Image (tube, rainbow, N blue to C red):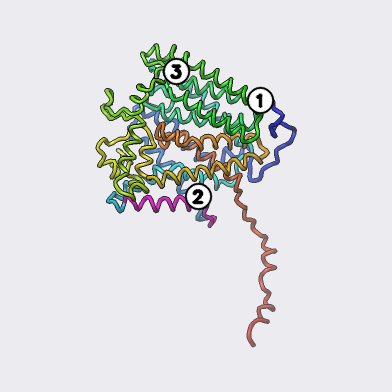
Amino acid sequence: MAQADYPYRNDRTAPKRENTVARSGWMREWWFRMLVVLFFAELIVPFLLWRAGLPRSMDFFKEIVAGVIVLLTFSFILLRDRIPLALLFILGVSLIWSLVPILDGQTAGATLWGWWRFFKYPLLLIFAYLIPRWPKDFPRWFMRFLIVLMLFEIGVQLVQLAMGEPPGDSLAGTFGWKGVASYSMFVFFAVCIGFGHWVATGEWKTMLLILVLGLVGSMLNVTKFYLLAVAVMGAAALVLHMLRGGQVRQLFVYVILFTLSFAAFVPIYNSFIANTRGLKPLQEYLDPDLMEEYLFNDGKGDEDGQYNFGRGFAITYAWQQIQRDNTTMLFGFGMGSRTYSAALGITGASLAEDLYGSLGDTGMGQWLQEFGVLGVVLFNLLNFWIMWRLFRHARTVSDPNLAAMEYGLILFTFLWPLWLWYHRPWIAGVMMVLYWVSLGYVFRQIYPRPRRVRRPAATRALDEPTPHATDARLPR
């Protein structure tokens, strides 16, 4: 469905970008191999731990790879003697929210582990930004990679289903046992990039393909939240479409398509998932009493014996906990206060003293307790600044694939509160690697780092004083 109002639908050739390398060259670069090792560690290790029976300590391999990349990032900064502003921001946040728990009596180990869990993936942005030479077709390659990975995961899910794994939280491809949250976060990120592709180019087939793949995968692992998430992402994409100058008449066509898609999802889910597994039909969740029971549940689960808080109750409880005093309300309990590591034997101070010891699956409650109101406000201000920079650049860039990536990142960044409400995004390693690396690449395009040009020796010699000139300046 070609559209005349889109600036990318013409015969202009995108200008060649500097600092790029051929496809056959960048795949052999050391930085690419490091990112590949980290990505596949996040993707494959959970599945191996579950199916191959490997010891749980093997999960620490991901931390080692990420640690090596972080050390290389700091080595880059020291060698080039240029500190990115993002690193200064990280250092400032680290200083403030690390002092809070230490002054409150928390151990340094818990604070350091909390810092690592929080900044491990955002530091990938700096690593990606410092990479000197990216492939010129990286955005197009990135989109194709997401589609291929979605197809691969659905293939693994179908194999699991054929081998007797019932639909549910563990039918999550290579994301392992109870890996539905990590799988869903990856799907939501891919859907945002698909919507961004539609906003940038007006081409809807790629977007529809990603939506269908996400639908199939979400039905296999029974992710009811997929319907709501896609509705919110679709509404945000429509607003973004209007902000960049889309035509209202064509907008109604897409609204009708979205409505028909959602209408088809409900009977398919009820027929193949709800009825076969004895679950509640989707329309019953619209009942106010049932919705309140689902969101504010505070009872123990029958299977795991742990408190399975509803998301509404978890956020309300977290807000009540930080009312201890004004400092706690503003800054929370500090970094690492809600952190836990069985391998290292570390438990945050607030988590150790908590009556329940958990806040369920929602990340917003944990975020609110660790960083307080001021941390939440600062996080949202940072997100709005990122979206503003991406939007300004996307409207002027001549590469439609790069613009599609930027619009997709705008959508995903705008919906961070939704992702935090849904789950704890920082445990979704695959999504976090894809998001922060792509964001670092985009900021490399927005703020290209000037390359240092080494002057020839003959030119530098002209600036050096001659012996006669030196002698003339000496006192007689």
The first of marks 1 and 2 along the sequence is 2
Based on the picture, tell me whether residue 89 belongs to the magenta stretch: yes
Could you tell me if the residues under marks 1 and 2 are in contact, i.e. CB atoms within 8 Å? no
Q: Judge depth for marks 1 and 2 and give the one in front.
A: 1
Q: Which residues are magenta?
A: 80-101
Q: What secondary structure is marked by label 2? A: helix
CA distance separating discs 1 and 3 = 44 Å
* Mark 1 to mark 2 CA distance (whole Å): 41 Å
Query: Do residues under tags 1 and 3 come within 8 Å of each other at their CB atoms?
Result: no
Q: Disc 3 residue type?
A: Val
Indicate which disc residue 249 carries. 1
Residue at x 62% of width, y 22% of height = 253
- Give the percent coordinates (x, y) of residue 65: 43, 41
Query: Which quadrant holds the C terminus?
Result: bottom right
Residue 48 at least partly seen? yes
Residue in the picture at 65% in, 25% down = 250
In the figure, residue 297 lies in which quadrant?
Answer: top left
Q: Which residue is mark 3?
A: 159
Residue 285 locus on image (x, y percent): 40, 20
Residue 351 within the segment the image draws in magenta? no
Amino acid type assigned to the residue bearing label 1 in the image: Arg
Residue drawn 67% across and 63% down? 457
Left or right position of 249 against 413: right
Is 93 situated left or right of 18 in this image? left
Q: Of tags 3 and 2, which is closer to the observer?
A: 2
Vertical position of residue 73 compared to residue 198: above or below: below
Quarter where residue 387 is shown: top right
